[in-house]
C-alpha cells in the first residue's frame, strides 16, 4: 500500500516539473469590453412623407477613454405597413453612416423599423437600437366630411389642431363630382394594381358613392384609383345606383341597387388583389338581390342588408358568399313568430349597436298597409345563419319616430336610436320604448340638421386620439357646422369638443387614423 502511494506521488511531481518546463507561446492579450451608452433617441417618430426631414442627434459615450465608433442607420418596412414589400420580401435600406441622421422622408406612408447600429472600432462589438417610424401624409389623419355642394359632391378634411383642407376633389381634379353624395367609407388596407408599374399597391382608401358614380381614392395623395366606369373586371359598368363601398374582413364590399359585390383581398394575410369587382353575388349561388338603400350592418365577418326583391335579410360573408337567414333560431327546428324572410313592410332604417360586445341590429319598418305605423326589429347578428330577430315592437302612435327624417344609432354605450323630427333631435330608448328631445349645449338653433351619427375610434394603441362622439351637422345659408360631443348615457355631454365649419352641406363623416389596420376593424364604425 505504501509503495502504491509513493508511486502516485512520484508521478504528480513529474507532471508538475514537466509543465513548468513547457514554454506557453499562446496570446493572452485580452480585449476589454467597454460599456457604451446612447442617449437622445425616442422609441418612435412620426413624419410627413415627401415633406419632413427626420433629424436625430444621439449622444454616444463609452466608459473607456479613446473608444471610436462607426454608425449605420437602416430603414425597413414593418409587417402590415402600407405596401407589399413586407409580404414579398423585407428590404433593408441604408439611410445614413454618421452619428447625426438627417433623412429626407421621401418614402411612401406606412410603418417602418428604424435601426441604429453602433460599432466599437476597438473591439468590433455592436450595439443596436430599434425604433419605429410612422410615415404619414397630410391626408393620413383627421375627420373627413362628405358634403353636398348643390348637385355636386366634395370633401373637406378637419384635423386635431383645427387646421383644415377644403374642397379636396375640386383642388385635386379641377372639379367636384357632378352628382349628389350618398356615402363615405374607408378601407385601411386597400390593395390595387398600379397600371403604370404593374405592381401591387396597398394603401388607405377613401370611398365615395354619389347618385351615379363611385370614387375609390388613394389617401396617400388623394389620387383616384377607380371610378364606377373603371372598377369592374369586365370593363363595363352596370346601370345602377351606388350605395356604399367598405372593407370586409377578407375583401372589399360594394352594394348598389343591383346587388352586393365582393373583391377578395387581405394584404396582411398575404392575399393580394386588384381591388376590382366582378358580377354581383348570388343568394345561394342562384338568386339576385336588390339591397335597400337605408343602411346596413357590418360586424367583422358579415355585412347584413335587406333585400327588396324577396323581402328578406341577407348577409355577405367574409369570403363574398351571399346567403339568406333561416327562420329558426340556433338549437331549434321550430319556426319563430317573427322571421327574417317575407317581411312585407318598408325598411326605413337599419343601424348597428355594440353595447356589451353584442352585435345588435335595429331595423325600423313602416307598415306595408298603414302609412305612419312602424315596427322596430331588435336583431342579434352573431349567430348567422340562424334567425336573428329577438323582439319586434310596435312604435306608439304618438311617437315622433313615426315621422322622423334622419336616423342613427349609438353604437357603443347605449341602446338608443337618434332621429330628427321637424328639425329637432330626439333619442329613442329601444329597451324602455321611450323618447326624449335632446338639447345639446351650445348647439345652434334655427339651422337645418343634415346629419347625425355616432363616430368613434377606440384603438388602444392610439389612446391620445381615442374618442366616442355624437356628431350633429347643420346647414344654413350655404355653410355647415359640425358639432362633436362626448357621450354620457347616450346623450351629448357638456360643450362640444370640436365645431367644424365650412362651405356646403355635410351629409356623412368618417375619421381616419394612420394606425388603422385590419386588426382595428372593430374599433371604428363600419356604418355609412
Image (cartoon, rainbow, N blue to C red):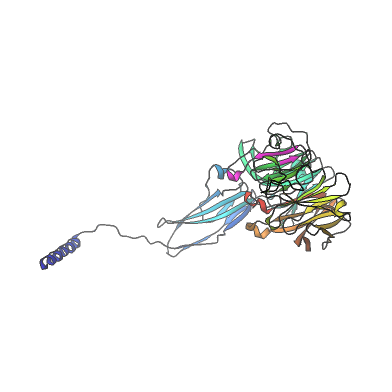
Query: Residue 462: percent from the left, percent from the top?
Result: 64, 57
Q: Look at the image and tell me whether residue 177 can be seen.
A: yes
Image quarter for residue 212? top right
Q: Looking at this view, is 528 or 98 the one in front?
A: 528
Q: Residue furthest front?
A: 334
The residues colored magenta run 254-272
259 is within the stretch colored magenta: yes
Q: Position of residue 411 (x, y in %)?
A: 73, 55
Left or right? Give the position of 17 relative to 377: left
| Depth order, front residue of 115/434 | 434
Q: Is residue 174 above or below residue 5?
A: above
For the point 79% across and 46% down, which residue is it? Answer: 294
Q: Residue 259: which quarter of the image? A: top right
In this view, the residue in front, 116 or 354, is 354
Q: Is residue 205 visible?
A: no
Where 268 falls versus 18 (above or below)? above
Residue ID at (63%, 53%): 47
Q: Position of residue 488 (x, y in %)?
A: 75, 63
Q: Residue at x 84, y 47 (%)?
A: 366
Residue extending furthest toward the left: 3
The reply, left or right, for residue 90 in relation to residue 383 is left
Amino acid at each position: 500500500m505504501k509503495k502504491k502511494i509513493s508511486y502516485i506521488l512520484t508521478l504528480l511531481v513529474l507532471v508538475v516539473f514537466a509543465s513548468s518546463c513547457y514554454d506557453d507561446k499562446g496570446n493572452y492579450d485580452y480585449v476589454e469590453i467597454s460599456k457604451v451608452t446612447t442617449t437622445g433617441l425616442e422609441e418612435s417618430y412620426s413624419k410627413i412623407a415627401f415633406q419632413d426631414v427626420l433629424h436625430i442627434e444621439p449622444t454616444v459615450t463609452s466608459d473607456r477613454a479613446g473608444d471610436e465608433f462607426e454608425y449605420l442607420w437602416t430603414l425597413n418596412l414593418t409587417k402590415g405597413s402600407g405596401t407589399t414589400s413586407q409580404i414579398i420580401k423585407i428590404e433593408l435600406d441604408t439611410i445614413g453612416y454618421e452619428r447625426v441622421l438627417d433623412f429626407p422622408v421621401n418614402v411612401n406612408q406606412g410603418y417602418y423599423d428604424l435601426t441604429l447600429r453602433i460599432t466599437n472600432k476597438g473591439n468590433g462589438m455592436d450595439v443596436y437600437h430599434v425604433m419605429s417610424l410612422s410615415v404619414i401624409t397630410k391626408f393620413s389623419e383627421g375627420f373627413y366630411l362628405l358634403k353636398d355642394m348643390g348637385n355636386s359632391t366634395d370633401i373637406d378634411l378637419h384635423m386635431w389642431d383645427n387646421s383644415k383642407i377644403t374642397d379636396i376633389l375640386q383642388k385635386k381634379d379641377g372639379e367636384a363630382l357632378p352628382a349628389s353624395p350618398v356615402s363615405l367609407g374607408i378601407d385601411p388596407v386597400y390593395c390595387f394594381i398600379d397600371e403604370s408599374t404593374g405592381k401591387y399597391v396597398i394603401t388607405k382608401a377613401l370611398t365615395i358613392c354619389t347618385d351615379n358614380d363611385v370614387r375609390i381614392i388613394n389617401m396617400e395623395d388623394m389620387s383616384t384609383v377607380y371610378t364606377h366606369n373603371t372598377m369592374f373586371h369586365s370593363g363595363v359598368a352596370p346601370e345602377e345606383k351606388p350605395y356604399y363601398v367598405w372593407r370586409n374582413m377578407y375583401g372589399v364590399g360594394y352594394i348598389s341597387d343591383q346587388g352586393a359585390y365582393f373583391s377578395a383581398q387581405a394584404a396582411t394575410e398575404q392575399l393580394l388583389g386588384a381591388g376590382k369587382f366582378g358580377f354581383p353575388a348570388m343568394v345561394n349561388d342562384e338568386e339576385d338581390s336588390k339591397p335597400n338603400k337605408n343602411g346596413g350592418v357590418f360586424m367583422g365577418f358579415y355585412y347584413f342588408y335587406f333585400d327588396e326583391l324577396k323581402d328578406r335579410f341577407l348577409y355577405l360573408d367574409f369570403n363574398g358568399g351571399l346567403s339568406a337567414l333561416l327562420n329558426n333560431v340556433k338549437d331549434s327546428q321550430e319556426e319563430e313568430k317573427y322571421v327574417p324572410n317575407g317581411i312585407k313592410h318598408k325598411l326605413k332604417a337599419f343601424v348597428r349597436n355594440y353595447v356589451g360586445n353584442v352585435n345588435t341590429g335595429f331595423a325600423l319598418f313602416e307598415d306595408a298597409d298603414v302609412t305612419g305605423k312602424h315596427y322596430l326589429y331588435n336583431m342579434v347578428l352573431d349567430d348567422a345563419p340562424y334567425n336573428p330577430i329577438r323582439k319586434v315592437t310596435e312604435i306608439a302612435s304618438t311617437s315622433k319616430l313615426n315621422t322622423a327624417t334622419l336616423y342613427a344609432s349609438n353604437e357603443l354605450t347605449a341602446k338608443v336610436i337618434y332621429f330628427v323630427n321637424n328639425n329637432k333631435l330626439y333619442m329613442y330608448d329601444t329597451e324602455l320604448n321611450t323618447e326624449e328631445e335632446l338639447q345639446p349645449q351650445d348647439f345652434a338653433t334655427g339651422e337645418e340638421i343634415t346629419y347625425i351619427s355616432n363616430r368613434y375610434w377606440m384603438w388602444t394603441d392610439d389612446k391620445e386620439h381615442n374618442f366616442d362622439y355624437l356628431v350633429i351637422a347643420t346647414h344654413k345659408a350655404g355653410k355647415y357646422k359640425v358639432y362633436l360631443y362626448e357621450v354620457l348615457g347616450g346623450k351629448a355631454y357638456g360643450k362640444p369638443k370640436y365645431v367644424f365649419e365650412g362651405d356646403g352641406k355635410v351629409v356623412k363623416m368618417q375619421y381616419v387614423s394612420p394606425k388603422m389596420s385590419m386588426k382595428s376593424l372593430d374599433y371604428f364604425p363600419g356604418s355609412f
